[in-house]
Image (tube, helix red, strand yellow):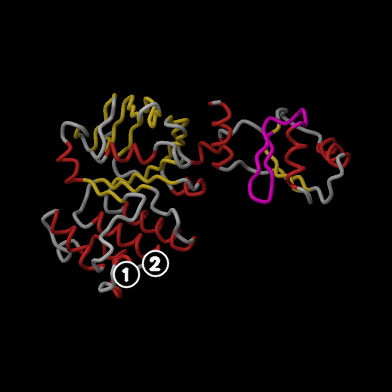
Amino acid sequence: MSFSVKVENLTKRYGETIALNEISFEVCKNELFGFIGPDGSGKTTLFRILTSLLIPDSGSASVEGFDVVKEYKKIRNICGYMPGKFSLYQDLSVEENLNFFATIFGTTLKDNYSLIKDIYSQIEPFKTRRAGNLSGGMKQKLALSCALIHKPLILFLDEPTTGVDAVSRLEFWEMLKRLKSSYITILVSTPYMEEASLCDRVALIQAGRIMQISKPEEIIQGYPYPLYSVTSTDKYKLLNDLKVFPKIHSVYLFGQTIHIAIKEDSIDLKELYAYLELRNHDRIEITSMRATIEDCFMELMQRER
C-alpha cells in the first residue's frame, strides 16, 4: 500500500508547551483523513509542519515521499494548503486572487478551470467583488479554489468549516467528496465531532497526542459501555446527582441532555428512576442510545487522564 503521508515520532515544542508529543500515523493515497480534536490539540502545528512552514524538534515526516525538512521546496509545489484563518488578499477581487495564486505556480485559471469548476462556479458571479466583502461560505469556496488552482497531489485543510453556517458546512463536505474523484489525498482538521463520520478514517487528537486512529464506524462500535441519555427539568442538578450514582462510569452534558455510561453490563432502570425521584427530579426520561464520536472522544480523554 502506498502512502501520501508518513509521520514517525513527530515532536514540536513551544517553550515548555508540548504541541505535538511523539505522534505517528500514515495516510493512504486518495484518502480523506480527518484530525478531530478541540482547539489547542496540535492540529494546526501538525499541518504547518507537513506543509513545510514549521520545522519539528524531533521525529520525521514525509509528504508524497518528500522529507518535510530536506525537500520542502518540492512539497510546496505539490500540496495545497487552506489555513484556518482566511488569509487571501482582502483588497483583491475574487478573480484577482485566483489569478495571483495561479501565476505563482506557473499556471492560469483557464488551464485548470475544470478542476475548480464545481466550486468556483458558485462564486464566479461575484468575481469582481473584493475578497474582504465576501460571506463566510464564499470566502471558504474562494480559499479552496486558490488551494486547488495548481492541481496539487495532496490538500491540507485546517479547520475549514469553523465559523461557517451549517448549510455551507454541508456543501463544503460534499465538495470534498467530489474532489476525491480527482485522486487528491485530503487531510482535514476540525473541532466538530459530527464531521468525523464524513471521513474515510480519523485520528482523535488531544493535547498533542493521537488517542486513536480508525474508521469512524469502528471507533463507535468499540465504545465499551452501555450508554443512556437522561433528561429532567433541572439538568444541572441532574448532572451532579448522576455523578454520585454508584453504577455510573461517566457523566457528560451534551446540549440539553446528559449522557451516562454504565459500569455494569445491565442496569435496573427502575433503580435509577427511584434514585432520581428521591432527589426531587421531575419529568425524568432515560433512553438507551448508540455512542457518538464525541462520546468515544470523551471516554478516551478520561483514559488518558
Residue 246 lies in magenta, yes or no? yes
Q: Quadrant of the N terminus?
A: top left
Residue 135: give its label. Answer: 2
Residue 52, compared with residue 233, is above or below; it is above
Q: Is residue 55 left or right of residue 39?
A: left
Provide the residue designation for mark 1.
123
Residue 105, compared with residue 93, is above or below; it is above
User: Where does residue 62 sit, x and y in percent of width and height?
Assistant: 24, 33
Is disc 1 placed on a helix, strand or loop?
loop
Tell me the amino acid under the disc marked 1: Ile
Q: Nearer the viewer, residue 269 or 300?
A: 300
User: Where does residue 16 sit, x and y in percent of width and height?
Assistant: 39, 26
Q: Is residue 228 left or right of residue 30?
A: right
Instruction: Residue 266: name its quadrant.
Output: top right
Callout 1–callout 2 Cβ contact below 8 Å: no
Q: Is residue 289 left or right of residue 13?
A: right
Residue located 29% across and 32% down the image: 6
Residue located 68% across and 36% down the image: 251
Main SS of the magenta part reads strand
> Dot 1, how many residues are within 10 Å of its Cα: few (below 14), some (14-19), or many (20+)?
some
User: Where does residue 217 sit, x and y in percent of width and height?
Assistant: 51, 41
Residue 45: give its label. Answer: none
> Dot 2, how many residues are within 10 Å of its Cα: few (below 14), some (14-19), or many (20+)?
few
Tell me the amino acid under the disc marked 2: Ser
Is disc 2 placed on a helix, strand or loop?
loop
User: Where does residue 213 sit, x and y in percent of width and height?
Assistant: 44, 33
Disc 1 vs disc 2: which is toward the camera?
2
Span colored in magenta: 244-261
Q: Nearer the viewer, residue 133 or 204?
A: 133
